[in-house]
Image (tube, rainbow, N blue to C red):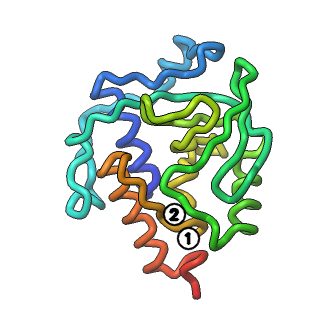
Amino acid sequence: MTDMKLILTVFVILSALTGVSAQTDPSKNISEDEINKLPRLKKMPKFGGIYESECGSPFAENGGWTELSGSVVEILSGSSFVMTTGRGERKQVTLLANDASDNEPFAREKLAKMILGKEIRVIVGLGEDKPEKLIGRVLVQNGSLIEINGYFLENGIARFKEMPWRSPWELCVDRQLEKKARKNKLGIWAK
Protein backbone atom coordinates (compact mmCIF):
# COMPACT_ATOMS: atom_id res chain seq x y z
CA MET A 1 0.00 0.00 0.00
CA THR A 2 1.49 3.34 -1.00
CA ASP A 3 1.82 6.15 1.50
CA MET A 4 -0.99 8.11 -0.17
CA LYS A 5 -3.38 5.14 -0.18
CA LEU A 6 -2.64 4.54 3.49
CA ILE A 7 -3.27 8.20 4.35
CA LEU A 8 -6.50 8.26 2.39
CA THR A 9 -7.66 5.01 3.99
CA VAL A 10 -6.88 6.37 7.47
CA PHE A 11 -8.76 9.58 6.74
CA VAL A 12 -11.88 7.78 5.47
CA ILE A 13 -11.96 5.31 8.37
CA LEU A 14 -11.33 8.02 10.97
CA SER A 15 -14.29 9.94 9.62
CA ALA A 16 -16.45 6.85 9.98
CA LEU A 17 -15.16 5.93 13.45
CA THR A 18 -15.53 9.41 14.91
CA GLY A 19 -19.16 9.56 13.92
CA VAL A 20 -18.55 12.44 11.58
CA SER A 21 -20.04 11.62 8.24
CA ALA A 22 -18.74 13.20 5.10
CA GLN A 23 -21.54 15.41 3.91
CA THR A 24 -21.79 15.76 0.18
CA ASP A 25 -23.41 18.58 -1.68
CA PRO A 26 -27.17 18.09 -1.05
CA SER A 27 -27.88 18.09 -4.78
CA LYS A 28 -25.67 14.98 -5.15
CA ASN A 29 -27.01 12.44 -2.66
CA ILE A 30 -25.17 9.13 -2.40
CA SER A 31 -27.30 6.19 -3.43
CA GLU A 32 -27.65 2.97 -1.46
CA ASP A 33 -25.83 1.13 -4.28
CA GLU A 34 -22.84 3.50 -4.05
CA ILE A 35 -22.67 2.97 -0.29
CA ASN A 36 -22.77 -0.81 -0.75
CA LYS A 37 -19.85 -0.62 -3.22
CA LEU A 38 -17.56 0.92 -0.59
CA PRO A 39 -14.81 -1.44 0.59
CA ARG A 40 -15.48 -3.22 3.86
CA LEU A 41 -12.79 -3.99 6.40
CA LYS A 42 -12.42 -7.58 7.56
CA LYS A 43 -10.40 -6.48 10.56
CA MET A 44 -9.20 -3.15 11.82
CA PRO A 45 -5.77 -2.40 10.32
CA LYS A 46 -2.96 -0.88 12.37
CA PHE A 47 -2.91 2.76 11.37
CA GLY A 48 -0.04 5.15 11.34
CA GLY A 49 2.43 2.34 10.55
CA ILE A 50 4.82 4.25 8.35
CA TYR A 51 4.50 7.56 10.22
CA GLU A 52 3.29 6.45 13.64
CA SER A 53 6.66 7.04 15.33
CA GLU A 54 6.88 10.55 13.84
CA CYS A 55 3.23 11.61 14.03
CA GLY A 56 1.55 9.51 16.70
CA SER A 57 -1.79 7.87 16.23
CA PRO A 58 -4.49 9.39 14.03
CA PHE A 59 -7.06 8.03 16.50
CA ALA A 60 -5.98 10.73 18.96
CA GLU A 61 -7.66 13.26 16.71
CA ASN A 62 -11.33 13.83 16.22
CA GLY A 63 -11.64 15.93 13.09
CA GLY A 64 -14.92 17.51 12.24
CA TRP A 65 -14.97 17.40 8.46
CA THR A 66 -17.45 18.24 5.76
CA GLU A 67 -17.26 17.46 2.07
CA LEU A 68 -18.24 19.54 -0.92
CA SER A 69 -18.51 18.14 -4.46
CA GLY A 70 -18.31 19.95 -7.73
CA SER A 71 -16.59 20.43 -11.06
CA VAL A 72 -13.34 22.35 -11.57
CA VAL A 73 -13.85 25.23 -14.01
CA GLU A 74 -10.64 27.28 -13.69
CA ILE A 75 -7.07 26.85 -12.46
CA LEU A 76 -5.83 30.00 -10.68
CA SER A 77 -2.34 28.83 -9.65
CA GLY A 78 -0.38 25.71 -8.84
CA SER A 79 -2.28 25.39 -5.58
CA SER A 80 -5.68 27.02 -6.15
CA PHE A 81 -8.63 26.75 -8.49
CA VAL A 82 -12.32 27.57 -8.93
CA MET A 83 -15.03 24.95 -8.78
CA THR A 84 -18.77 25.04 -9.36
CA THR A 85 -20.94 23.05 -6.96
CA GLY A 86 -24.06 21.10 -7.89
CA ARG A 87 -26.05 24.16 -6.81
CA GLY A 88 -24.15 26.34 -9.27
CA GLU A 89 -22.14 28.15 -6.58
CA ARG A 90 -18.59 29.17 -7.49
CA LYS A 91 -16.00 28.42 -4.82
CA GLN A 92 -12.31 29.27 -4.79
CA VAL A 93 -10.30 26.39 -3.33
CA THR A 94 -6.73 26.39 -2.05
CA LEU A 95 -4.87 23.14 -1.42
CA LEU A 96 -4.30 22.70 2.31
CA ALA A 97 -0.64 22.68 3.41
CA ASN A 98 0.70 23.20 -0.15
CA ASP A 99 2.87 26.03 -1.49
CA ALA A 100 3.63 25.63 -5.18
CA SER A 101 5.08 29.12 -5.72
CA ASP A 102 8.61 27.73 -6.35
CA ASN A 103 7.29 25.44 -9.06
CA GLU A 104 4.40 27.55 -10.37
CA PRO A 105 4.30 26.82 -14.12
CA PHE A 106 4.75 23.05 -13.67
CA ALA A 107 2.42 22.84 -10.64
CA ARG A 108 -0.29 24.81 -12.44
CA GLU A 109 -0.01 22.56 -15.51
CA LYS A 110 -0.05 19.39 -13.38
CA LEU A 111 -3.08 20.60 -11.38
CA ALA A 112 -4.92 21.42 -14.63
CA LYS A 113 -4.19 17.96 -16.08
CA MET A 114 -5.35 16.25 -12.90
CA ILE A 115 -8.56 18.17 -12.11
CA LEU A 116 -9.66 20.74 -14.72
CA GLY A 117 -13.12 19.84 -16.02
CA LYS A 118 -13.39 16.92 -13.60
CA GLU A 119 -15.67 16.16 -10.70
CA ILE A 120 -13.83 16.49 -7.39
CA ARG A 121 -14.49 16.37 -3.66
CA VAL A 122 -13.07 18.98 -1.32
CA ILE A 123 -12.80 18.06 2.35
CA VAL A 124 -12.71 21.02 4.72
CA GLY A 125 -12.77 21.33 8.50
CA LEU A 126 -16.17 22.33 9.86
CA GLY A 127 -16.32 26.04 10.62
CA GLU A 128 -12.95 26.72 8.99
CA ASP A 129 -14.18 27.47 5.51
CA LYS A 130 -15.36 30.84 4.28
CA PRO A 131 -18.45 30.87 2.07
CA GLU A 132 -16.60 31.57 -1.19
CA LYS A 133 -13.00 30.60 -0.31
CA LEU A 134 -12.15 27.13 0.93
CA ILE A 135 -8.90 25.58 2.14
CA GLY A 136 -9.00 21.82 2.10
CA ARG A 137 -7.96 18.43 0.82
CA VAL A 138 -8.90 17.67 -2.76
CA LEU A 139 -9.86 14.20 -3.99
CA VAL A 140 -10.22 13.23 -7.64
CA GLN A 141 -10.92 9.93 -9.36
CA ASN A 142 -8.20 9.42 -12.03
CA GLY A 143 -8.33 5.68 -12.46
CA SER A 144 -7.80 5.46 -8.72
CA LEU A 145 -8.72 7.93 -6.00
CA ILE A 146 -5.97 10.55 -5.66
CA GLU A 147 -5.58 13.00 -2.79
CA ILE A 148 -4.02 15.93 -4.65
CA ASN A 149 -2.47 17.67 -1.61
CA GLY A 150 -0.41 14.66 -0.55
CA TYR A 151 0.43 13.76 -4.15
CA PHE A 152 1.93 17.22 -4.71
CA LEU A 153 4.01 17.00 -1.52
CA GLU A 154 5.13 13.40 -2.08
CA ASN A 155 6.27 14.14 -5.63
CA GLY A 156 8.02 17.46 -4.95
CA ILE A 157 5.49 19.49 -6.91
CA ALA A 158 4.80 21.72 -3.88
CA ARG A 159 6.43 22.57 -0.56
CA PHE A 160 4.76 21.90 2.78
CA LYS A 161 3.03 25.05 4.07
CA GLU A 162 2.58 25.32 7.83
CA MET A 163 -1.02 25.82 8.91
CA PRO A 164 -1.04 25.35 12.69
CA TRP A 165 -4.82 25.60 13.01
CA ARG A 166 -5.22 22.27 11.23
CA SER A 167 -4.95 18.72 12.55
CA PRO A 168 -1.48 18.09 14.07
CA TRP A 169 -1.46 14.47 12.87
CA GLU A 170 -2.47 15.46 9.35
CA LEU A 171 0.20 18.18 9.16
CA CYS A 172 2.81 15.78 10.52
CA VAL A 173 2.00 13.31 7.74
CA ASP A 174 2.25 16.13 5.17
CA ARG A 175 5.69 17.00 6.58
CA GLN A 176 6.72 13.36 6.21
CA LEU A 177 5.55 13.30 2.58
CA GLU A 178 7.68 16.36 1.82
CA LYS A 179 10.60 14.78 3.67
CA LYS A 180 10.24 11.69 1.47
CA ALA A 181 10.29 13.85 -1.70
CA ARG A 182 13.41 15.67 -0.44
CA LYS A 183 15.17 12.41 0.34
CA ASN A 184 14.32 11.00 -3.10
CA LYS A 185 15.23 14.33 -4.78
CA LEU A 186 11.89 14.62 -6.56
CA GLY A 187 10.52 17.70 -8.29
CA ILE A 188 11.69 20.92 -6.66
CA TRP A 189 14.06 18.90 -4.47
CA ALA A 190 15.98 17.49 -7.47
CA LYS A 191 18.44 20.41 -7.42
Q: State if disc 2 and disc 1 touch (CB < 8 Å).
A: yes
Q: Residue at x 21, y 49 (%)?
A: 57
Q: Position of residue 4 (x, y in %)?
A: 46, 54
Name the residue tied to disc 1. 156
Q: Residue at x 35, y 42 (%)?
A: 10
Element carrying mark 2: helix
Q: Which mark is residue 153?
A: 2
The answer to whether 23 is drawn above or below residue 157 in the figure is above
Q: Which mark is residue 135?
A: none
Relative to 7, is 141 on the left or the right?
right
Quadrant placement of the N terminus: bottom left
The answer to whether 130 is drawn above or below residue 165 in the figure is above
Q: Position of residue 149 (x, y in %)?
A: 53, 53
Three-letter code for the amino acid on which mark 1 is drawn: Gly
Element carrying mark 1: loop
Q: Position of residue 123 (x, y in %)?
A: 50, 36
Give the distance between the C-alpha atoms of the residues marked 1 and 2, in whole angstroms: 5 Å
Question: How many residues crowd mark 2 within 10 Å: few (<14), some (14–19), many (20+)?
Answer: many
The answer to whether 71 is drawn above or below residue 37 in the figure is below
Instruction: Tell me where residue 155 sits by quadrant.
Output: bottom right
Q: Residue at x 52, y 11 (%)?
A: 32
Three-letter code for the amino acid on which mark 2 is drawn: Leu
Relative to 78, is 186 on the left or the right?
left
Q: Nearer the viewer, residue 138 or 95?
A: 95
Question: How many residues crowd mark 1 within 10 Å: few (<14), some (14–19), many (20+)?
Answer: many
Relative to 160, is 6 on the left or the right?
left
Q: Position of residue 111 (x, y in %)?
A: 70, 55
Q: Residue at x 45, y 25 (%)?
A: 22
